[in-house]
Image: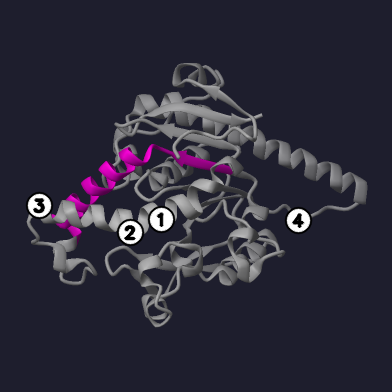
Amino acid sequence: MDKLDFTSPFFKFSPQVWATFAHSSNRLSLTEEELKHCLAFNDRITLDEVRTIYLPLSRLLYLYERSRHNRARVITQFLGKDIESSPFIISISGSVSVGKTTTAKLLYSLIKAWPTEPKVSLITTDGYLYPNKILEERGIMNQKGFPLSYDVRRLMKFLIDVKDGVPNLQVPKYSHLSYDVLPDEYTIVDRPDILIIEGVNVLQNGADYPQVRNRIFISDFIDFAIYVDAKEEYLIDWYIDRFLKLRESTFDDPRSYFHRYAHMPENEAVALARIIWQSVNHENLVQNILPCRNRAHLILQKGPHHSIENVYLRK
């Protein structure tokens, strides 16, 4: 399951070789304190790894985004009139607990430092999950995060509007404390130059969603797709570690959806985390997330300590 199936060709790079692709003019402005704000709950990345992996990636994205502008100029010349520039959309996908949020926040910080000073927005697809009440009514609460648990039509409407340059779009907010979509709370996305969208489902297409099959889908709007990858044995360890740390912090809040687990003995908490992984996250990974991996433009493959061991770039 964890071997990459190269039916679509990729270049493979070690971190040492990948680091050489950083342009000589690129300088890392990110500080240690700023890096801390980028890290997800139990992720671990050093500034050296940011320089080695993420700075060259930021440079690659910059070149892709510039080439898109060049194509737009060709169309403008051909049509003989100016066309409205739409945002360059970067997607970040991968399994639960792999570190998508950290990757998204790091790229957000690095892209904002581009010489063109682009306007950057970052959202997650969590806000487009159906509220828990609807999931419970439909009997699919145990499949939260699976394709059928998303209001995909609402997500598609947002992507169409953002590409059309509609101002002040409302993206629903999701709370990991209440484990639910927050009613009447939104993130505003106002005509960004770059949009980063993070979620387990952003590489899926109409074939993964029978209710919208043969129509345009999320992947049709993505300009550059990144997949964060790791062996499932590492993912399980990271998930359990996160579960235990949340048990000692967030779960202790009476408002937390998982408050009932706050004072559970550690051995029982570990056993519960394994059950949740196997019954929910493993199934979603195997059925829905992993099959989309080779649709990505770039794959960041992590080792057991969260560090990137290989980078795969589509030829």
On screen, 150 above or below 106?
Answer: below
- The Cα–Cα distance between marks 2 and 1, rounded to whole angstroms, is 6 Å
| Residue 9 within the segment the image draws in magenta | no
SS at mark 2 in the image: helix
Question: What numbered label is drawn on residue 84?
Answer: 4
Report the amino acid beneath label 4: Glu
What secondary structure is the stretch in magenta mostly built from? helix
On screen, 139 above or below 161?
Answer: below
State if disc 2 and disc 4 touch (CB < 8 Å).
no
Q: Nearer the viewer, mark 1 or mark 3?
A: 1
* N-terminal-most mark, 4 or 2: 4
In this figure, which residue is indicated by the disc labeled 3?
266
- The Cα–Cα distance between marks 3 and 2, rounded to whole angstroms, is 20 Å
The image quadrant where one finds the C terminus is top right
State if disc 1 and disc 2 touch (CB < 8 Å).
yes
Report the amino acid beneath label 2: Ser
Place of residue 179 in the rendered image (x, y in percent of width and height, measured from the top left): 31, 67
* N-terminal-most mark, 4 or 1: 4
- The Cα–Cα distance between marks 3 and 4, rounded to whole angstroms, is 56 Å
In this figure, which residue is indicated by the disc labeled 2?
279
- The Cα–Cα distance between marks 1 and 3, rounded to whole angstroms, is 25 Å
Place of residue 127 in the rendered image (x, y in percent of width and height, measured from the top left): 45, 66
SS at mark 3 in the image: helix
State if disc 2 and disc 3 touch (CB < 8 Å).
no
* N-terminal-most mark, 3 or 2: 3
Q: Left or right: 67 with respect to 284?
A: right
| Residue 247 within the segment the image draws in magenta | yes
